Amino acid sequence: MKSGLKSIATSIAAFFMLVSVSASAQNDWVDATHLFEEEVRSVIDTVSRDPEPMFLMRNRAAAPEIRSFAIGDTQTFWTKNIVENKFEETRAVLKAIGKNCYVFLEEGKTLAPEAIEKVRKSFDEVIYPTNTTNFGSEWKPGIDGDDRIYLLMFDIKDGYNGTGGFVGGYFYAIDAYQQEKLPAHLKSNEREMLYLDINPSDPASDRFQNTIAHEFQHMIHFNQDSSEYTWVNEACSQIAPYLCGFGHANQVVSFMRTPDNSLTAWSKQQMLANYGQVYLWNYYILHHYLRENPEMRTQFFKSLVASKKQGVAGYVEALGAVSRGFTQTFDRFAIANFVNDTRVAKGEFGYDKTLGKLKLPVSDTVAVLPGEVAGEVFLWSADAVKIDLANARSSLKVSFQGFRGKMGEDQYNSFTVALLMQDSTGMKPSQISYINVQPIGSKLQGGEIAIDATAGFDSAMLIIVAQADEEVDDRVYANAIGMKYTVKVTDSGAAVARAIAPVDVRATVAAYAGAAGNLETSDEAAVMIALQQLETARNALTAELQRQLESGSENVSVSVDEMIEAGEIKAELVAPLRKTLKEAETFNFCR
């Protein structure tokens, strides 16, 4: 096997191993387009693609004929066996002809006529006009001289065995090249074509139409800018179904599970989280900057897709046209994902009601003051640290230090560090302030902030946003490790009498176990609610444990163990909670 193919095969094998683990709780679909990026890039760099005038001038005998189809006709197509990374021939039957598409179904497979008609109608009347309006045109009439796009519905060989993630579809850009110009190991169908899974995908569902919209954007993007970076291309494909009216991306929940994920790196270790994050990124821009002006929205995405600048540079250009900066927008986006409260800073840190339950979990908690935590965060990502103020004195000081690395001439990574003072009851709007982060020698940067802790807040959240220099190509640091940081929190001054509501330990533990059980559902809204309930219960029990330890009474961990022994809750559902409580106990005993 050629070294390039070995690399692709290894990437595909690792991809499916990770997807099967991360998506075990629900059947999340992923797009396989990016898996072929290496071989597509090799073709783009070495093979010329005939422009339309040349197509019209070519010898008809050497060019694919413009076909005349009738319902029931059969065609044989080259398709990808994703698991084995090889081409296979798939015979399919033409089931519908639309204004903008041919709908083919794998021979031997059956679908209800209503499902086939839904696919045809959805593409012709919704997906095609919406995507071309917002992102631009595909290559038209393209390599085959036919305006219609082929939609091939078949069982993609992705290793799906009834559980876990699966490939929902893909766009294969090499279909835009003549077979005679390609190396022997690559195959082209020589037509504009989308590949759509029917196992376990259901063509009658809106989720299937979501996949078509996603893949069609890839086709458009390839025609407009074939050199685009994966994360930008996928971000546009993720927002396409929303623009078509198919709702929010289901992978948002996966991002909530693994929030420390670089927006720009397209990590193979957190594939599903990538899709959720880039969707939210474009949705944040849409919701905050473009929703009141459809023409501006159309111009924004069209210019982004058509731009010959890739990655961050393309967004810098597109955001500049609406008088926004990339780093500023990313900061607000990252903070909004943890806060999601429209009452803060005139709404710039919140989403609309359809994402009202979205809140990323914190990565660490300072339960006892003084306290210190250390962590690391990827570039164009964010961490959050919760600070329990239940027993804090009147003055609070938070100090931050993070790694400072050189990325070019006078170019360094940077941090935005925001401190949010919070009322756990939600009755009082949170207040936000920022640490002034400055260089501390050649390898560190940091700063500190002092806050009055008497103003009726019982907790705080420190949000740490890591950035690269906008002018550095994001592929340069795509494989960068996390940026290390430390946070120190101290209090001083007079004791503060805070009204502390009693915690019903057993009821709260039961609520935690119930929320953990709800993570198994395929309903993304229910999972978002469950994740928030887990965080609320964990924080309440950690604070209660600290109060109990200080008073010498029976601690929370004993109650959890008793409930497990009595069969009231399952041990596996509260295992992360037990670990958190044990760590808090150990810290207290070592003080």
Image (spheres, rainbow, N blue to C red):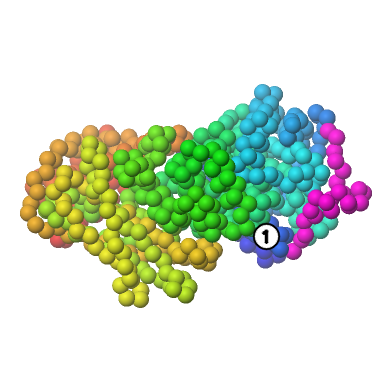
- Residue at 52%, 51% in the rendered image: 321
**Quadrant placement of the N terminus:** bottom right
Residue range (magenta): 46-69
**Quadrant placement of the C terminus:** bottom left
557 and 137: which is toward the camera: 137
Magenta span includes 54:
yes
Q: Is residue 505 left or right of residue 269?
A: left
Is the residue 86 above or below the residue 437 in the image? Answer: above
Q: Can the viewer see residue 214 in this picture? A: no
Residue 92 horizontal/vertical position (percent): 76, 36
Residue 413 horizontal/vertical position (percent): 41, 66
Is the residue 41 above or below the residue 206 in the image? Answer: below
Secondary structure beneath dot 1 equals helix
Count of residue discs: 1
Q: Is residue 23 left or right of residue 206?
A: left
Which amino acid lies under the numbered mark 1 shown in the image of this protein?
Answer: Arg
Residue 167 horizontal/vertical position (percent): 60, 44
- Per the image, the residue denoted by label 1 is 41
291 and 587: which is toward the camera: 291
Residue 291 horizontal/vertical position (percent): 48, 38
- Residue at 54%, 59% in the rendered image: 313
Q: Can the viewer see residue 505 in this picture? A: yes
